[in-house]
Image (cartoon, helix red, strand yellow):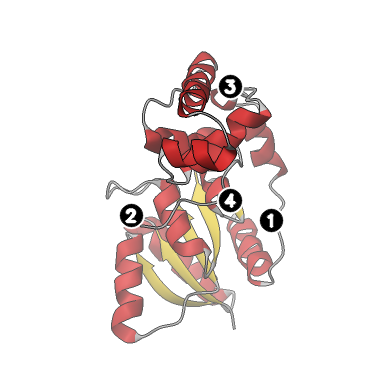
Amino acid sequence: MTRAALIDDHESVRLGLVAALERDGVEVVFAGAGVAGYREWRAEFGAPPADVVLLDLTLGDGTTVTENVTALAGESAVIIHSVADRPAAVREALAAGAVGVVSKSSPLDDVLGAVRTAARGEPLNNVEWASAVESDRAFADAQLSTREREVLRLYAAGLPLKVVADRLGVAYSTAKENITRVRVKYTEVGRPAPTKVDLLRRAMEDGIVDTAPEG
């Protein structure tokens, strides 16, 4: 039997999904308002991870979609359950490891089908969402050069710029100039990255780094 967890800060949404999933033969092991609550429940009861987690795109506890998906995706198939007007956040979720997206306006049968598909380890058909993401001007390609991508990959992964320069065999001033150009290019396409955290986010969005660094 498929084991599912529901994380949504709207109780009415949780109650409706619990009823629908259980009618469909899915065991709902957790239903709550945040990822922290889910992880605390698992720790308290020594529970294994759910096979599938239905996760609201935006929770009211101040967490980010990248934080939430990253915390879950290593152990469970994460399906984003969201409204359809947030392509930027959807792309962020997919970049962090979510297996797909189901709109909150979708029929319940579509949601149930997505859970069954994810539980089998199969990819979700996200043609509609992929189209929305690709057409989102907020994610215009910054057209980074190969060297700029190399510098960004190492720097965004947490290495000091001097170490990045040493690893790539270039002068510190060259590495610094590359990062400056990267920031300028992202700003020019409407995706500013003034801080190192912002650079990591851009690198994850563009597939330059796979996941957030540990620690």
Q: Do the residues labelled 1 and 3 touch (CB within 8 Å)?
A: no
Q: Are marks 1 and 2 in contact (CB under 8 Å)?
A: no
Q: Please name the amino acid that badge 1 sits on.
A: Leu
Q: Do the residues labelled 2 and 4 touch (CB within 8 Å)?
A: no
Is residue 84 in view? no
Distance between the alpha carbons at the discs numbered 4 and 3: 22 Å
Sequence-wise, the earlier of marks 1 and 2 is 2
Sequence-wise, the earlier of marks 1 and 3 is 1
Sequence-wise, the earlier of marks 4 and 3 is 4
What residue is pinned by disc 1?
124
Local secondary structure at mark 3: helix
Sequence-wise, the earlier of marks 3 and 2 is 2
Q: Which of 162 and 113 is in front in this view?
A: 162
For image coordinates 46% across by 21% down, the residue present is: 180
Q: Please name the amino acid that badge 2 sits on.
A: Asp
Disc 2 residue crowd, few under 14, some 14–19, many 20+, Cα 10 Å: some
What residue is pinned by disc 2?
9
Dot in front, 4 or 3 = 3
Q: Is residue 2 above or below residue 212?
A: below
For image coordinates 43% across by 61% down, the residue present is: 71
What residue is pinned by disc 4?
102
Q: Do the residues labelled 4 and 1 touch (CB within 8 Å)?
A: yes
Picture disc at residue 137: 3
Dot in front, 3 or 2 = 3
**x and y percent of residue 80 in the render?**
52, 52
Q: Please name the amino acid that badge 3 sits on.
A: Arg
Distance between the alpha carbons at the discs numbered 3 and 2: 29 Å
